[in-house]
Structures are given as structure tokens and as C-alpha cells.
Amino acid sequence: MGSWGILVLILALILLRQPLIVLMGAITIYCYYFLPDPPLESFKELNSVIGDLFFAGDKEILLAIPLFIIAGNLMTHGSIARRLIRIAAAMTAPVPAGLAIASVFSCGIFAAISGSSPVTLIAIGGLMYPSLTKAGYPTQFSMGLLASGGTLGIIIPPSIPMIVYAIMVGVSVTDLFIAGIGPGILLMTLLMAYSIFRAGNVGRSKWDWTEIKIAWKEGTLALMMPVVILGGIYSGFFTATESAAIAVFYAILVEVFIHKELEIPKIPKIMAESAEMLGVLFLILILAVSLNKFMIENEIPQNLVATMSEMISSPVTFLIGVNILLLIVGMFMDIMSAILVLAPLLAPMAINYGINPVHFGIIMIVNLEIGYLTPPVGVNLFVASGIFKQPLGKVIQSVAPIVGMFLIGLILISWIPEISLGLIGSGAEGAAGK
């Protein structure tokens, strides 16, 4: 069976639509039973597994994940999202499709705070959908725009999937965050162009300077949050983990003590909701890191790279194949599952073809971002159906043209590495095999 057996097992369980905990458990059992040379002979030798679990849990960057989720939940229950929307709407009033563009900006800014696509969709979509339909925007257009705008939460930094990829592959989280800026702007631009094309004459008005003044006065602290978080990371003033802690502190300070729109007694409930989201995720993440360490020690990725090199001769062929694979995987697996399972296997192959691992991480995340909008497991489709109270079929129809535009963006991001790597000055070789 060997190394290829892992891929066969993964694909079989994906097709059977097994949950992630079953997938990771099956892979772990397979690896520890079939792959060691010599095989494990007693339960005493499983002490190494326990040691691997401690190794996996002893990573500071793991703290960033629950902290960013808590910060996002605090802002969802508070008023930061509403204040960001008011600024964006006031500033884009006379622009073609101004309110729609304000929705895209709001999604992008909130994504830069929460780091989560579903949280972004819930926070911005729940507020903007009634406003868009009331202003005369078509229902189907409004649904598709907001469901797609919510996916910006995983490509615009800080991004929880980027943190997970960095842990699994061993690259800099800060580099990944910086690399996400260009692709994030590209996808936002595509969404705004789509808005102007579909609804350019809807709801245009003149600038209301009184409204602009009030919006900025009430929303400056909300708008400063991504500036503080991202500015601190990129300047090197604090780490990604420290920025997550600052995000929680800032959200509590602003929402509870300045805006006074979040009551202190509600905070324990928000913490409990966040803990519920994280319980299973952390167990699986630690298990995945331990399994990754096992596979590296047993040269499983290296063996797959050697085999793949015999079958695929160029970076271009590899990227075409891996993009197709990830688009299919994104239809059946959520992004965390896909990164935990596939990143340790695919990233070494990408490096072997001269593709920078940071650039490959962005490619992988954009592919799986599109998966948020494709059935049968597209998370944002189900979230949008729930908050907009529309049938799932209508939501799928609404996002179809935007998925096509995102595929164009994916092609550009894959074959023009400077979009991702330009700001970090890596000079890395890209998909075209420079």
C-alpha cells in the first residue's frame, strides 16, 4: 500500500462524505499500522504518539485561532459591523452601484478583523441584505454578492485558514498575511466590477456631507481596528498571536466601554459559543500536526514528490492538476479539513516544482474559498440560505456568475505570483516555471 494508500484512503472517505474526525482517525490508524518500518509491535511504542501530541500542542500560533474567533463573535454581537457599513455607504453613495460596492468594502474590512468567512457573512449580510433589497437591488443579485463577499474572510488577512496552513507547512504567518493582500484586493475588485455591470444604475444619490460626518464620527474606532491589528503585524511591532489578543481587547474596550452596545453579562455566553466552535477543531488540529510530524519522519511526502516528479514534468502541468483537484475537494470538504489533510502532502510537491510555499498557500486557500460557494458542502451557501431565508437552490443560482469571476481571479493568482509575493519581495519562482 505505502504512501499512495493514504491518498486512496483520503479520496475514498471524501467520496463517502465522512466527517473530519473520522477522516483524521482513519488516516492516523493507517499510518501507524502500515507505514512504520519495522511496524509497531506493542502499545508501549505508542508513547511516541503521545509525545507527538504534546509537540503539536506546544505552538504559540495556535492561540491566535480562538482569539480571532472570539474577537469576531464579539463584533458580531456588538455594533462594529453596523458602523463600518454606515461609513462605506456614506462614502459610495454617488458611485454606480454604490450600496453594493459599500457591501463589498464592508465585507473586506470586516474580514480583515474577524478572519472568518461565515462570521463575515453573518455580520455584514444580515445587515446589508435588507438595505440592498429595499434600495431596489434584485434579490438574487443581493444574495450572490453578499454570499460571495463573505468568502473574503479567508483570503484577506488575518485569516484563520492561513494560520492553519502556516502551522501545517511551516511557513511564516506574517508572510502569508502579507501575501493575501493582493489576491484579496483582486477579488474585491472583481466583485465591484460585477456590481457595476449588474446594477450600476440602482440607488445612486448625491453625497450627504452631514451623513458622512456623522458616519465617520461614530465609526472611526471601528475602522481603526484593522489598522491597529494589521499595522502592528506588518510593522513587526507584535506577532500574529499577539494581534489576536489585541483584537479581543480592542473589541471589548470599544463595544462595552465606548460604544456601550455590548453588555458585560453577555460576554460569558459569547465565550461559550466560541469554545463550542473550537472544541472539536482543536482536537483535530493537534492530531493533524502530530500526524504531519509522523509522515515527515517516515518520508511520506518525499516519496510522493519523487513519484509525482516521474509523472509530471513541469510546474504548469502540476498547477493545472492541483487546481482541478482542489476545486473538486472544495466541493466536498470544508476548508479546515482540506488544509489539515492535503497541505502537508501537496506543499512539498509544489516546492519541488519551484513554487514558493507561501504562493502555493494562497493558491490553495483561493481554491478552497471558491469551495465555500459550490455545492454540496459550500458553507456560505447554507449560511446565506439561513440568514436570507431563501431556498438553497436560489442561493446557488445567485452565486454562479461570481464563481466564474473568481475562477478568472484564481487563474491570475496562480500564474502571476507577483500578485501574492510582490509585497513580501520574495523573488520566488512562480507557476510559469521562471
Image (tube, rainbow, N blue to C red):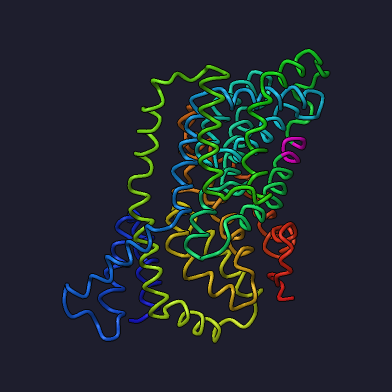
- Image spot of residue 157 (x, y percent): 61, 47
Let me know if residue 194 is in the magenta part.
yes
* Residue occupying image coordinates x 54% and y 26%: 253
Tell me where residue 321 sits by quadrant. bottom right
Residue 416 seen by the camera: no
Residue 408 appears in the rendering = yes
Say which quadrant the N terminus sits in: bottom left
Q: Give the main secondary structure, helix, strand or loop, of the magenta stretch.
A: helix
In front: 405, or 85? 85
Question: Extreme top residue here?
Answer: 210
Tell whether 288 sits left or right of 122: left
Vertical side of 259 occupied by 119: above or below: below
Chain part drawn in magenta: 192-197
Percent position of residue 301, x then y: 46, 76
Which image quadrant: the C terminus?
bottom right
Taking the magenta stretch, the answer to whether it contains residue 316 is: no
Depicted 418 relative to depicted 280: above or below: below
Q: Name the residue nearer the viewer: 113 or 207.
A: 113
Placement of 393 over or under 185, stated as above or below: above
Left/right placement of residue 425 relative to residue 166 reads right
The relative height of residue 21 versus residue 29 in the rendered view (above or below) is above
Q: Could you say where residue 228 lies in the image, as x and y percent from the top left?
A: 65, 38
